[in-house]
Image (cartoon, rainbow, N blue to C red):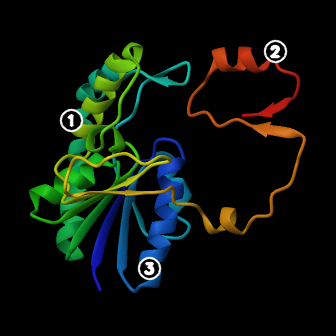
Amino acid sequence: MANILYGVNGEGSGHSTRAKEVLTHLRERGHTLHVASFDRGLRNLSGDFEVTEIFGFRFAYVNNRVRYKRTIARNLVTMPQATKSVYRLKDLITKWEIDLVITDFEPLTCHVGHGMGLPVVSIDNQHCLTNTVVSYPRQFRRDAAAAKLVTRLMTPHADAYLVISFFTAPVKKRNTFLFPPLLRQEILKAVPTQGEDVLVYVTSPAPLLAKVLSTVRGRFIA
């Protein structure tokens, strides 16, 4: 059995929702788990696992869309704030004799793991952009290039990339493996029903989306 450090991006709830299923599976197999996260990841996982709070790199949103240049600039400015978390993670790795780092798009655990000579496994959907062959309409190529740059900076040089995708695509890197979405047991066991409301998931304020929805007959819960 292994001592595993599992880094979870706390931006939104998708990373921690996915990580909870993987963490539960690993715990049932007898592995010892130490989670590192922030914001919603910290809140969503601390009730079930031992979670160390770390500094979180954030995405910059405008109208619920990621602005990649602004994201890079903002995180470069806040880089010094991450130093304490780096030392905290190094101490944790030494104290608990960590064997493996798994990261769900969380950069600090990835970079610290590399620095201490540990194998790193990445689980996320973002690396579908960089590690598979995907084409884009011409008008989106600039956005795609920015998204790829951010993805490469976040969790680079992992020993293996487990990429979650709704669609199949040719893999162009040997250490990359494509998987369908990881669903919670609650979802798999749920019985579908027809309700009156439409659920809308947004990561940040989205006034333009709200304006569009206001023109549609129906009730929306964001």
Q: Position of residue 13 (x, y in %)?
A: 54, 47
Does residue 132 lie above or below 97 as drawn? above
Q: Earlier in the sequence, mark 1 or mark 3?
A: 3
Neighbourhood count class around disc 3 (C-alpha, 10 Å): few under 14, some 14–19, many 20 upward: few
Q: Name the residue at 54% across, 56% down.
A: 17
In the rendered image, which residue does mark 3 sit on?
27
Q: Amino acid at mark 3?
A: Arg
Neighbourhood count class around disc 1 (C-alpha, 10 Å): few under 14, some 14–19, many 20 upward: few
Q: Amino acid at mark 2?
A: Thr
Q: Nearer the viewer, mark 3 or mark 2?
A: 2
Question: What is the distance, in whole Å, between disc 2 and disc 1 at their CAs?
Answer: 45 Å
In the rendered image, which residue does mark 1 sit on?
80
Q: Name the residue at 32% across, 47% down.
A: 170
Quadrant, the N terminus: bottom left
Q: Nearer the viewer, mark 2 or mark 1?
A: 2
Tell whether 114 sits left or right of 3: left
Q: Name the residue at 46% across, 60% down.
A: 19
